[in-house]
Amino acid sequence: MQNLLDFDVEQLTAWFAEHGEKPFRARQVLRWIYKTGESDFDAMSDLAVSLRDKLKQIACVQAPKVVREELSDDGTRKWLLDVGTGNAVETVFIPEADRGTLCVSTQAGCALDCAFCSTGKQGFNRNLSTAEIIGQLWWANRQLGKDSDGNWQISNVVLMGMGEPLLNFDNTVSALRLMLDDRAYGLSRRRVTVSTSGIVPAIDRLREECPVALAVSLHAPNDNLRDVLVPINQKYPLKELLAACQRYLEKAPRDFITFEYVLLDGVNDSEQQARELVRLVRDVPCKFNLIPFNPFPLTQYRRSRPDAIQRFRDVLMQADIVTTTRKTRGEDIAAACGQLAGQVRDKTRRILQRSVGAF
Ligand code: SAH
Ligand code: SF4
């Protein structure tokens, strides 16, 4: 059975051609899947009955299975999705006054082992398929439905769930294309954000192949500290990372990079470190998103104190860097940044070498 969620628009059209069907048939099916949220070929009423019968035999529209749903007091929703062989990943919907954001996972676990991240602590199991990535949006849209104007409630997507999107490059880009393509979801490039810990060659590839808004997880003002907090820094140090950010801006849909910075009490949150950070990013048009650390069991870190967060922010603002402090959402259901854990069978180290080595 071919899962049609595994194809971007070009691939679906090619697959239809292989089966003797015209491109407009592919477009009709795309409309049903993504604009209506339909998975039942029998309900696709403008397709010839013979085509419906053929599709039923050889294809399906299948999102990952949802094993649990949780609803936070603040309206945040979290779904735990079964991705087979004992692994589960998480998807989070964050409603706000002017938008609805879905936070999507791209890998079961993560090989990069950032010191403060609960996903990283579980090790890496495997890359999600295109169907498993776009299936999170497809399924959440179906659950949440449309607003009074007939638009899906999800207006923004951030790849900030479990995993490093740029180490699952091809499947991530196919899923991004479906988010952007007018024949599927048609989201603006500015409303789709990839968050990366800084895989330099893959940032360059994304710029060429599918530029969307970019968030880079910085977390430290110098290589010594970043080597510890974000170990991939040992391979792609700050100087190279910031140069890649500058190159990215040549083609990016926004004219700034968002730098994410988790504030850890007594580790990276002093005023002196904030000043060092200002000097570090001097040449990169950017905004900062400060994330108060979200604790999880067995972590050695603590969230910075509110006055430290305020002072850190003031230093950046005084240097004319637009800085927001991320509101923590869905904490009561462990849906906040870096708390996503799912259940992942750890296959870790060897795969770390392989997946990082591929770039
Ligand atoms: N792998 C990508 C995207 C997923 S993580 C990346 O690292 O950017 C999304 C964001 O959550 C990153 O900025 C990450 O550093 C941050 N994060 C991880 N653990 C966290 C925690 N415990 N508290 C707050 N933010 C965390
Ligand atoms: Fe992986 Fe991102 Fe967590 Fe680092 S912060 S371990 S890159 S998911």
Image (cartoon, rainbow, N blue to C red):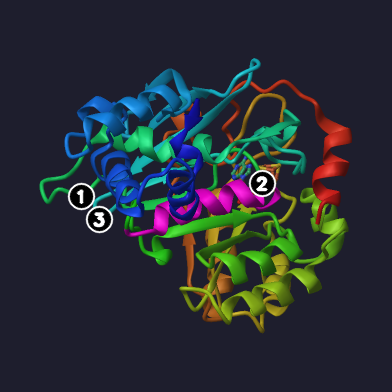
Going by the numbered disc 2, the residue's amino acid type is Asn
Q: Which residues are magenta?
A: 164-182
Residue ID at (65%, 16%): 85
In the rendered view, tell whether residue 44 sits above or below residue 245: above
Residue at 57%, 24% in the rendered image: 83
Residue 40: % across, % down: 29, 26
What residue is at 75 percent from the left and 64 percent from the top? 200
Dividing the picture into quadrants, the one containing residue 219 is bottom right
Mark 1 crowdedness (10 Å alpha carbons): few <14, some 14-19, many ≥20? few
Separation of marks 1 and 2 at Cα, in angstroms: 29 Å
Check residue 98 in the rendering and tell me which mark sits there, or answer none: 3
> Which quarter shows the C terminus?
bottom right
Residue 151: mark in rendering: 1
For disc 2, the neighbor class at 10 Å (few under 14, some 14 to 19, many from 20) is: some
Tell me the amino acid under the disc marked 1.
Answer: Asn
> Is 170 included in the stretch rendered in magenta?
yes
Dot 2 beta carbon under 8 Å from ligand 1: no
Q: Is residue 143 left or right of residue 306?
A: left
Q: Is residue 269 visible?
A: yes
Which residue matches tag 2? 168
Q: For residue 237, what is the image quadrant? A: bottom right
